[in-house]
Amino acid sequence: LDLSHQNWASEMPDWWDRLCAALGASTVLRSLTISHVRLTQPQMQSLHGALKLNDSLTTLTLNDSCITDAALSALSPAFVVNTCLTTLRLAGNEVTNQGLAALFADILQTDTVTELDLSRNPLAEAGTQCLAAYVAHSTALAALSMAGT
């Protein structure tokens, strides 16, 4: 399901709540792409709740969605519970070292992510050190993209 480049808020103000409710109840959706849509911390908290309930989604793409460290930190605890997700794409957001630390602490607990895209995020040296520690401890990660970082 690709919901990229959508401006649902003006036509359907509760679109995010409806999406998260459907995602939480879904047993068949395998891939969700929400790119080029500004995602806020409260929206990521709702997505967190949906991912905790979902047991079918294997690919989540949230590229170019202005995701901040706080928003990512609100979402990442879902990865402790959701063991189906294998591909996570977060390219072109506002994730820094702090967001990476929260993400890695949570996804290492289940270690099911095999593909991770962090391209075009403003990572400093501390972020790359955090990433190196994650890669050293992950037994699942097979593909990592850091282009333009």
Image (cartoon, rainbow, N blue to C red):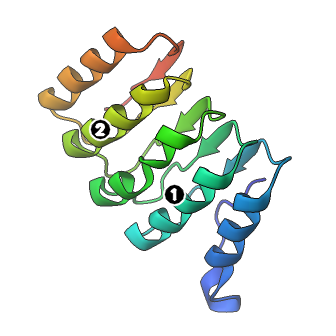
Tag 2: amino acid: Leu
Number of numbered discs:
2
Q: Which residue is rendered at x = 72% and y = 43% of the image?
A: 55
**Residue 34 visible in the current orientation:** no
Task: From the top left corner, tell me how far across and down residue 32 is, in percent.
Answer: 70, 50
Q: Which residue is rendered at x = 56% and y = 24% of the image?
A: 112
- Residue 127 position (above or below residue 62): above
Q: Which residue is rendered at x = 29% and y = 23% of the image?
A: 131
**Residue 41 visible in the current orientation:** yes
Whole-angstrom CA distance, mark 1 to mark 2, is 16 Å
Q: Earlier in the sequence, mark 1 or mark 2?
A: 1
- Residue 91 position (above or below residue 53): above
In the picture of the structure, the residue carrying the numbered disc 1 is: 48
Task: From the top left corner, tell me how far across and down residue 103 is, in percent.
Answer: 36, 39
In the picture of the structure, the residue carrying the numbered disc 2 is: 100
Q: Which residue is rendered at x = 56% and y = 20% of the image?
A: 114
Secondary structure beneath dot 2 equals helix
Secondary structure beneath dot 1 equals helix
Task: From the top left corner, tell me how far across and down residue 118 is, in percent.
Answer: 41, 34
Q: Nearer the viewer, residue 137 or 88?
A: 137
- Residue 101 position (above or below residue 13): above
Few, some or many residues within 10 Å of mark 2 (<14, 14–19, 20+): many
